[in-house]
Image (cartoon, coloured by chain):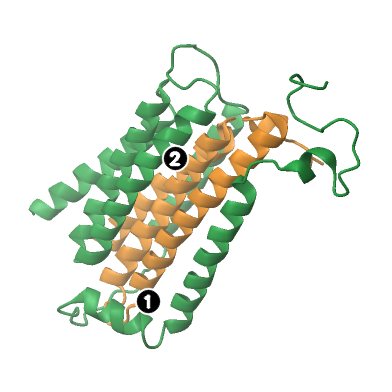
């Protein structure tokens, strides 16, 4: 195992998540794509801690932040989904294109 | 050697189940595919000596995905996969962008000379993490705590039921309630 292997793995996870976030219509599926992208951040930060700077805990702290961001993203995302669904009976992104320029 | 094998198996498994999330029809299956992807990724975190963080990710993701299944079934256009429909838009563009991103990131991964450290790794990484977040990285912990509290307030405010002020306006002077779905008494 090397840092390149881990980063390649993280890049693959990130790209799959990006595809999901861009292509899905359902708001919940977009959140799944975002979660995959954040998972890539966790893998990358853990690899950097192990291979590049095991003496400082910065990489571990970054993993902790990514885990928190995942939890916040899930909670806030579902709350927004609930609010949008209540207000307009909408569960698809194409139906909430108010800010489309 | 066994670590190499486990790493590549888990990496392939995580990416494959990540792809499966957007391929399967049933939303319960998609959520559990995402859970499998997270579990495989957590195993690779465990491989780099991060026992505490690996187990943390593992436990949190299992809980999160079990909750997510409920929301998936609640808010999906096609919850059980019984009604074939397309749930994507601009698929070719998304595929092109993500493939391009992967190509760029892969090039960066192999072209950049990543720093490597020969320094001894701490015997107990969890201990080092604990000392960091209670010492030099305490600001991170404070901000994370505030952000989580703000999230609690936000989610409650967003998810509360529509009350009379939503329906009849700020001064309760609307004659007929402003509801997303018409029907019921008094319309």
Q: Is residue B62 above or below residue B54?
A: above
Q: CA distance from mark 2 to mark 1?
A: 26 Å
Q: Circle 2 — which element?
A: helix
Residue A58, numbered circle: 1
Question: What chain is tagged by disc 2?
Answer: A
The answer to whether marks 2 and 1 sit on the same chain is: yes
Q: Does the residue at mark 2 contact the one at mark 1 (Cβ under 8 Å)?
A: no
Query: Mark 2 or mark 1, which has the lower sequence index?
Result: 2
Residue A81 image-quadrant placement:
top right
Q: Nearer the viewer, mark 2 or mark 1?
A: 1
Q: Position of residue A97 (x, y in %)?
A: 75, 36
Q: Residue furthest front?
A: B185
Q: Residue at x 61, y 32 (%)?
A: B93
Q: Which chain's colour is orange?
A: A
Q: Is residue B80 something that shows in the picture?
A: yes
- The extreme left residue here reads B1
């Amino acid at each position: 195992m090397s840092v390149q292997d881990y980063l390649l793995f993280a890049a693959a996870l990130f790209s799959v998540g990006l595809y999901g976030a861009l292509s899905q219509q359902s708001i919940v599926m977009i959140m799944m794509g975002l979660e995959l992208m954040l998972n890539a951040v966790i893998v990358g930060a853990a690899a950097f801690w192990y291979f590049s700077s095991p003496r400082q805990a910065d990489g571990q702290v970054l993993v902790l932040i990514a885990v928190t961001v995942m939890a916040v993203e899930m909670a806030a995302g579902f709350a927004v989904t609930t609010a949008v669904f209540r207000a307009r009976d909408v569960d698809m992104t194409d139906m909430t294109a108010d800010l489309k320029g | 050697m066994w670590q190499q094998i486990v790493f590549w198996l888990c990496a392939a498994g995580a990416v494959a189940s990540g792809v499966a999330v957007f391929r399967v029809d049933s939303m319960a299956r998609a959520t559990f595919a995402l859970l499998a992807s997270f579990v495989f990724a957590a195993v690779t975190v465990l491989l780099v000596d991060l026992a505490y963080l690996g187990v943390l990710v593992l436990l949190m993701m299992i809980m999160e995905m079990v909750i997510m299944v409920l929301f998936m079934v609640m808010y999906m256009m096609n919850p059980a996969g019984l009604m074939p429909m397309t749930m994507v838009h601009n698929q070719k563009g998304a595929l092109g962008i993500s493939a391009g991103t992967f190509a760029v990131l892969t090039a960066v991964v192999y072209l950049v000379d990543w720093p490597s450290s020969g320094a001894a790794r701490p015997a107990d990484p969890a201990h080092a993490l604990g000392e960091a977040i209670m010492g030099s990285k305490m600001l991170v912990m404070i901000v994370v705590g505030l952000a989580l509290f703000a999230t609690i307030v936000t989610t409650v405010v967003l998810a509360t039921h529509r009350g009379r002020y939503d329906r009849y306006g700020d001064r309760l002077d609307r004659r007929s309630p402003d509801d997303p779905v018409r029907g019921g008494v008094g319309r």
